[in-house]
Amino acid sequence: MSDDVTSPKYVMELSLAENTAEKLRSVKNPSKRSLVKMTASGEHADGFDEKKAYQAQEEEGQKYFDDGREIDLLHFIFDKPDIASIRGSPQKVLDAIDEYGRTKKYLMNVGDQKGKIVCDLIRDRKPQLMVELGSYVGYSAILFGDTMRNVGGSKYFSIDRNPEFAAVTMALVDLAGLNDIVKVIIGPSAECIKRLHTDGSFGAKIDMMFIDHYKPAYTTDVKLCESLGLIGPGTVLAADNVIKPGNPPYLEYVRSSVEEKRKKLEQGGFEPTETASFGRRWWNQYEDRIGEEKLDIEQPGNPNLVYESRLIHSYEPTGVPVRISPILQIERLTQTGWD
């Protein structure tokens, strides 16, 4: 295996991240529903402030999205008496979304705690082009798009197959004054990726990708981007919900070695759509709208891409402790044996 394009800078950062992870410990904090993290330097990272907690997510069998709450959110925000002061302020729009999630109904947003992790990555990597799979109501598009603009980024694409979610996102992105950098795309993720690649919108490569859409599509969409050459050495991926509710096929794929991926490909490839890996709730997430989801499972991907990953401890907006990602950087590309 050739290491010609290994990034020493990232390997050093990864080593630090691994050392930090080994020193994480959980302690009970009676004043907060939280975990307190010990960093490599011995400092404690603050836990979750319960005053910021969203309403609890509905139980199994109950609707927790696409039941009218997304449109209700628009009325909640645009009916505010201080709407004029909110207009043009990304942070005030995010605050208004958070207020709805805390006082009205649960919203499946990334939230400010997990969002900060990705914002720190954006500030560090300074991507020119970032792609988001899964807009929902636009929380992450506003948060990450604003951060990207502040570090000199040029374009943030937010893709969602649900036209109502995309319309809500467009309205709130416009309210936040981010139309110059955030572009919302409507349609199935694989179709949109192919179209934006064909028309040149993505340019040569995607610098950063935030994955937070239909869970079975994580693996197939990453492999599609690999096959199209849209992600390569230096690309950073941040994937949400891979631990809760879980995404075993995605984790298996990105954690496999080059040799393991080549062998799998010879045997017919990975099984990214294995229903048992997700549970019926997540597999049938959009069944009411579109029926059975059709995924692009024919893409071979690029088994020669080497991912380096780390899991980050954080919190759902409801205050539930979780681990985000893995945060992935494609460290190197090996060409041996690949046509």
Image (spheres, rainbow, N blue to C red):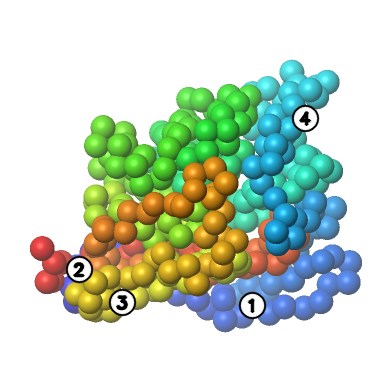
Query: Please, what is the three-letter code of the amino acid marked with disc 2?
Result: Thr
Work out which residue is located at the far right of the displayed protein and give it: 31
For marks 4 and 3 on the same chain, the one whose residue lies earlier in the sequence: 4
- Numbered disc in front, either 4 or 2: 4
Q: Residue at x 68, y 32 (%)?
A: 71
Query: Please, what is the three-letter code of the amino acid marked with disc 1?
Result: Leu
Disc 2 packing (10 Å; few <14; some 14–19; many ≥20)? some
Residue, disc 2: 334
For marks 3 and 1 on the same chain, the one whose residue lies earlier in the sequence: 1
Q: Distance from label 4 to label 2 (Cα)?
A: 52 Å
Query: Please, what is the three-letter code of the amino acid marked with disc 3?
Result: Ser
Q: Distance from label 3 to label 1 (Cα)?
A: 26 Å
Quarter of the image where the N terminus is located: bottom left
Viewer-proximal residue among 310 and 319? 319
- Numbered disc in front, either 2 or 3: 3
Q: Distance from label 2 to label 3 (Cα)?
A: 11 Å
Residue, disc 3: 257
Query: Can see residue 185?
Result: yes
Q: Residue at x 83, y 72 (%)?
A: 29
Q: Position of residue 325 (x, y in %)?
A: 52, 63
Q: Distance from label 2 to label 1 (Cα)?
A: 33 Å
Q: Distance from label 4 to label 1 (Cα)?
A: 40 Å
Residue 312 left/right relative to 15: right
Query: Please, what is the three-letter code of the amino acid marked with disc 4?
Result: Phe
Residue, disc 1: 24
Residue, disc 4: 76
Viewer-proximal residue among 37 and 199? 199
Viewer-proximal residue among 129 and 317? 317
- Numbered disc in front, either 2 or 1: 2
